[in-house]
Each structure stands twice: as C-alpha cells, then as structure tokens.
Image: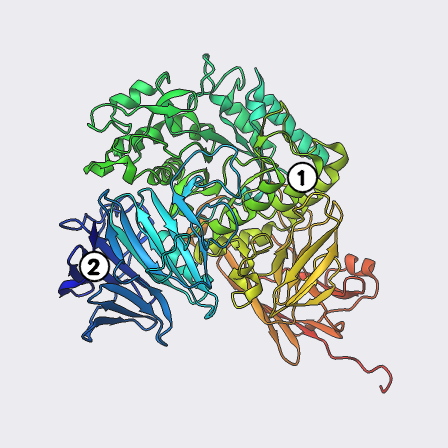
Amino acid sequence: MKISHKIVNIASGANVLELETNAAKYRIMLINDEIVRIRCTFDEQFAEEASYALAMTAWEDKMDDLLEERTRVAALPIPYEDLGTHLLLSTSNLKVRVYKEPFAIEITDPNGQVLHSDLKEKSYVKDSLGRLYHYSCMDDDDYFYGFGEKSGYLNKTKRRMRMHNVDTLGYDSELTDPLYKHIPFYIKLNGKSKIASGLFYHNSHDSVFDMGCERSGYWNKYSYFCADGGELDVFFILGPQIKDVIRNYTDLTGKTMLPAKYSLGYMGSTMYYTELEKDSDKAILKFLEKCEQEGIPCDGFFLSSGYTTGQDGKRYVFNWNRDRFQDPKGFVEQMERKGASLAPNIKPGMLKTHPLYAEFAEAGAYIKDEQGERPEIDRYWGGAASFVDFTNPKGRELWKKHLKDAYISLGITSIWNDNNEYEINNLDAQCHFEGSGKEIGALRPIMPNLMALMAKQAIAEVDPDVRPYIVNRAGFAGIQRYAQTWAGDNHTSWKSLKFNIPVILGMGLSGVANQGCDIGGFYGPAPEPELFVRWVQNGIFQPRFSIHSCNTDNTVTEPWMYPGYTQYIRDAIQLRYQLVPYFYSLLFEASTVGSPVMRPLVYEFQQDAKVLEESFDFMLGSFLLVANVLEKGAETRSVYLPEGTDWFDWYTKEWYRGGQTIEQKVTLGSIPMFIRSGAIIPMAPGLRNIHKDVIEELRLLIEPSEESSFVYYEDDGKTNNYQKGDYLKTTISIRNGKETKISFVKEGRYETPLKTVVVDVICKEVAPVQVKLADTKLPMFLEPAEWEASAAGWYYDMEQKTARIKHEYVKDDYDLIINFDVKDLISI
C-alpha cells in the first residue's frame, strides 16, 4: 500500500504547481477563480492528457481534434506562499492550503470557511490491488447530491454507491445500484453554513463512493472515492450556491445540447407493435390516428428493436424486417405527414450471426481480446456478440456509414441508442484509444458517449443544418452534450413512480438537464388505471415524455388503454403541450447555463433547512412547484411550500405564505401545482402538434409581487440556424415601484410567428386601476366577451383574481405598466 505522507519536492511552473510526495506525484492547477484541479499519480510519470469527457481544458489534449465543442482557457498563474507547515495558493474566491506533513489539501473561501479538507494521514492511497482512494473529511450535517443516475432518496449521505454501467432490467428505483449511467460527480452542501461545493473525479474506471457509510473511531468522519485504476484526477468546484456548482461543472463537461423542439412532445412507444408478425408500420400509423381521434397530442414514436428482427428471430442493428416494415422510407414519409418523427432503436453489440459482423471484424472495428488480435466476444441480447469500438476511427467511420445507409438516407434524424452499457466481462479486452491502446475497464462508460457523438456527426455530415434528436440509455460525464437520456427499464409499480423522481432530480444535479423515465413502467404487468393516471400526471413534467412498455402480461400500455380514465390522460398531456414554450426556454437555459429543467427544492431554496432532504416534490424551472400525487388511493396531499416567497395555487390562484405545510384535497384528476411569487411562465394554449402547429398566441402567466426576470426563447426548433444568430431571446422583467412595470427586451433576428400576446397578471391584493402599453392606455372591459372580441385591452377576472391583458405582438422593446392604486370612489 502507498500513502502520501509528506512532500519531498516542490516545483512551480507558470500555471501549475508540481509536488512530489513519498508515494505519489501531484499537479495542482487553478483553472479559474472557482475551479481547482488536483491531479495525482502513483506511477513514475503522469499519463498523457487524453479526455473524452472534458469540454473545457487549460492544456493540450489528445482528443482536441475529435471534440469540436472543446474550448481552451488560460489557467490562472500559480504563485504560492510557503508558510512553513503548508503552502498557500489563492484565487479571488478560494484559498488552497497544501500541508507538507502529514500531506493533505484543504480548500476554504476567503473568510476561512472550510469547503473541502482531505483526511490527513490517509488522503491519497493506492492499495496492493491497484485501487486508488481519496479520503475527504465530512460533517454529520453535510448533505450529498448528484452522483448521476442513482436510486433512492435525493440526499446520499451514509450511502455507498458503485459507479458502473449495467443493463438493470426491471430495477428497484429505491434500492438497485448501480444503474445505467456512470457520472463520478457530487455536490456537498453543509447544513450549517449552507455553502455548496462539488467534486468531479475525472476517472472512467469502475469506482465506489462511500459518503459516510463507513465509520472508524480512529479517524475523523470521512467519505471516500475509490477507483479500480487510472489516476486521482479531482476537480474541486466552488458554489456557494448549488446552481453555481452546476454552472461550473457544466463549463467543464459541457452544457446540455439544445434538441429539436419536437422532442418536447409526447413520444409514443412500446415493444408490442414491433413484435407483431407483420404490418408493424400500419399498427404505428393507426396509433397516431387514434391519438388524433382521442385529442391526445403526439409528435413522434420510439421504434423498438423488433423492427430489426432477422429470419432467425434475432435482432440485427441496421436491418429492417420487411414483413413488419414493407417500405421503410415510405413509412418515414407517412409519419412525417402526420407530424411525427421516428426514432429507431440502435444497439452497439453485433451478434456473431449478424450479416455485417464480418465487415466490422475485417475493418478491425470491434473491441479486441486482451492480446489485441481478435474481436472480444461476450454475452448480449440474442447470444454471443462483439462490440463496436468507438475509440477507433475505423469503428466510428463504419458505424456512421451504416447509420446513414439504414436511417438517415430515409429522412430519419432521431436516433435512439439503447443497450449501450458495454457489459464486457473481460476488463482487459483492448480498445484502440486513438492508436495508444487501453483496456475496456478504463473506457467502458466512455463508449455510449462516443456512440451518441457518432449519431450527431453522421446526421451533420448528411445535412449540417438539421438539428438532431439523440437519446441514450447509458453514459458518462458529458453525455448531456450529445443526447437526452432516460432511466432505463424501470419496473411497473407505485414505488417506481415515486422513486424515479429523485433518480431524475439527481441526474439534473449532475449536469444532465434533459432526461426522464418510461411512463407507466417498462417491465412488469400493465399498470392499474390509477397508477397509470398518476404516472402520466408526473411524466408530463419530465423533459423526455414517453409512455413505453414491455408488459409481461401480453398487454400494451397505451394512453386509451382504460377508456373510463382516458380523459385524465388527455388533460395531462394537453397541459404538457400548453407548457411547451416554458419547457423550451428552460432547455435553452440548460444549454447556456447548465440549469436542470426539473429541480429539487434545495436547488431553488438552499437556505430552507426543511427542503434539504425533499426527494419527491420539485420545481419545474424557477417558478412552478409540482407536488404530484404518488400514493395509491390518496384523498389528500400534504405540501410544504418553501419559505422566503409566496405561493399561489395553479388552479384557483389562492395565496399561501411560504414556510408552511398545507393539506390539499385531491381527486384522480388532481395535479397539485403552485406558482412562485415573481413567476413568469410562457404558454401556448391549444398547441397540439409541435411539428405542424404555428404558435401565434403567447400566453404569459405572471405573478408580479416579487421582482424577477425570465428569458423566453424562440427559434425555428428544427435547424441549427440558431447557432448563426437566428433566434429570439425576449428577456421579460418585473420591476416594482410606484407602478408595476413588465419589460420586454429583445435580442436576435428570428422572425417570430406570434401575432397576439395575452398576459395574465395574478393580483394578490387589488385589481389594477390602469394598464398602459408603453405610453398608450389600454381600454378596460367589464365583459370578458368584449375583451375576447377586441384586439387589445384588459379585464379583471374576479374568480381567478387575475388581470387579463391582451395586445398585438410588438416587435421592438416595450413596457407594460400596471397601476395598482386604489381608486377612491367616494371622495371624488
């Protein structure tokens, strides 16, 4: 065993501090005022810089040419003070103390508040099996969030979790570990100081996080990270707010890709249709027709892998079963005419009986055995298979060729990457690694990221203007740059409905803003009616909204499967579509800032001790609290409304002060939702298809008692022209003074199709006495029908306590000015 006990040599470069201890070498770099890199190796020298995960570096890296999205920054100069017992490095926001003996690193804010501290005498360790450990001090009132896709409650304190990609069919969303994603990053929030910070371990070997599960009386309380190999390459990331940690982390690993807008629609899916003996295409087209008949919006269909089935009943990627899909190109065109995209299921494992197996083998495109001579063969769905090596340019190019031939040439621009966990049991199987060679045990979670990148590149090579929609089941840190994800093959149960929420929230806190789960449950018997309704009512708030099933009782989960309950399903999905402008603006925010779409309450209300462990109620963006009904037979729902703001019931606009728990009666149709004071929520009433419908009326729901702002984002939703400035950002701001001013400031050259804007202003205490559009006084109506018939004006809805303001779309910047003075009708 090797343990760094003391520093034996110090060398300083322009922007890196080189340290040698009795056991290991270290490089410390100040990436910026908020990010510190600590790199440790127990080998004779550091490995070459070669990262598929980082989107931002301050050094040359082997993958610079492969990753077009990578940016290079200049690290800060690194002068240090030698204070005898320790070295001191400083940024404007951090103090880094490197203790000489016993060796340890401590990071504080400028006020001396400890943010991270290594466990002295046991900080950096390599054991006799080659495993690497990093031990950190912790307090009993520390809360830990993130870790990627993890089961259980949001706070992972006293949890031990394994980082490993695995195909967890029918998993328990409270207890199963690991799942499909491997993201070695977490956020620590100290319960006393309420300061947040993060640690990202840039290491793709299998690993373990122990967040205080292990205890020893010989040591201060600690947590640890343990990796099976590689280096201890640690990035410390400052908050002090959780949202700051995520912003900085996604600067490192990349922001969420802005997807095609239709991806926010309902995506139909089931394995059932593609397993029919024939005419699966007709079944899917009938599904879309049934959606239209039932008034259920739908914008696409995930095509399960049964479409690839060969004569022997095996699934072969890139193959179309002509009994089930007689004319794939014609089918894609028919789908397009109906306003629905097609996302075919694609798998990276190729069975030995695959018609293309030899072509990939001859090209050397597979991961090879440990001698690097023959394709490695392992278990897979359907039998023995080899796996495409996406660290090999030959594997990448051949994969893209067949993506184009089999799908993109047909007009398909949506790719569903499935079963890509790379469960290769021989960890010494060899990957090309851009010519350097490396074992799969070091690269397993990287493969699904590169698989998604290949889909993005292949589509761009055919048509650089089209915006792709890519979905991945597995992934590593940075997967958000290329794909939407989902939480795999969940079990059909009330528990899955409930605990899939913190699974999704944890992914959002790990930089992956665009994700969801299979609504209704994937594996198990058909959901009972009440469970199905509640799951859809929850699913409409997930960025990925798809009802997807592989039911074990010979049934298929469809929106109308229980006719007596279809109205509840229809109402929920139509609410989802009404909120599409809000969702799309939140995805734009994720693509620029890194913010999650679904946010745990602690993200928005970090100072409220009562929300630090809330796992099931969440915020949709900054302004909407969702408290879904998650219990069978529930007649009431307790909801804690965070302090520091006011809240308004979505339906009645009843006002509640924050910092209290309320009890609401619920029915099967209830979706408890609460509007935060200062809310600005853009909506599109009547939207039914994102592909075909043009939004000409924008509705803004605004609560003006608290000053705030929101960026309403628009572009064409389907091309990459937004990257060339063809977008429109409208910053909507609330300012309070003698009068309430709602300002609209525009940026960008996108020509919006909007013709009318309706602003619903919640009036907490009194109705307006006057409303002006810039300098023009808008007419006030007493009758709603007169207001409806007018081009501009306002009226007060007494039941909703809302002033409804309407005007024609204004292209330039402007203000709405609302006067809430109380008119004295007696003394006039």
Q: Residue at x 49, y 45 (%)?
A: 151
Q: Is residue 337 above or below residue 164?
A: above
Number of marks in picture: 2
State the image coordinates of residue 187 (x, y, percent, origin top left). Answer: 42, 58
| Image quadrant in which you'd find residue 424 | top left
Q: Looking at the picture, does residue 177 appear above or below residue 225?
A: above
Residue at coordinates 28% horizontally, 59% vertically from top-left? 37
Locate residue 24, reporting x and y percent: 18, 55
Residue linked to disc 2: 27
Residue 813 in view, yes or no:
no
Return the residue at label 1.
531
Locate residue 170 relative to residue 796 in the image: left or right.
Answer: left
The residue carrying pointer 1 sits among few (fewer than 14), some (14 to 19) or many (20 or more) residues within 10 Å by Cα, namely many
Q: Is residue 239 above or below residue 66?
A: below
Q: Does residue 526 appear to the left or right of 766 in the view shown?
A: left
Coordinates of residue 683 in the picture (x, y in percent): 64, 54
Q: Observer-nearest residue: 413 or 512?
A: 512
The secondary structure type at the circle numbered 1 is helix
Quadrant in which the C terminus appears: bottom right
Instruction: Give the mark, 1 or 2, whose residue is nearer the N terminus.
Output: 2
Q: Of helix, strand and loop, which one carries label 2?
A: strand
- Farthest right residue? 826
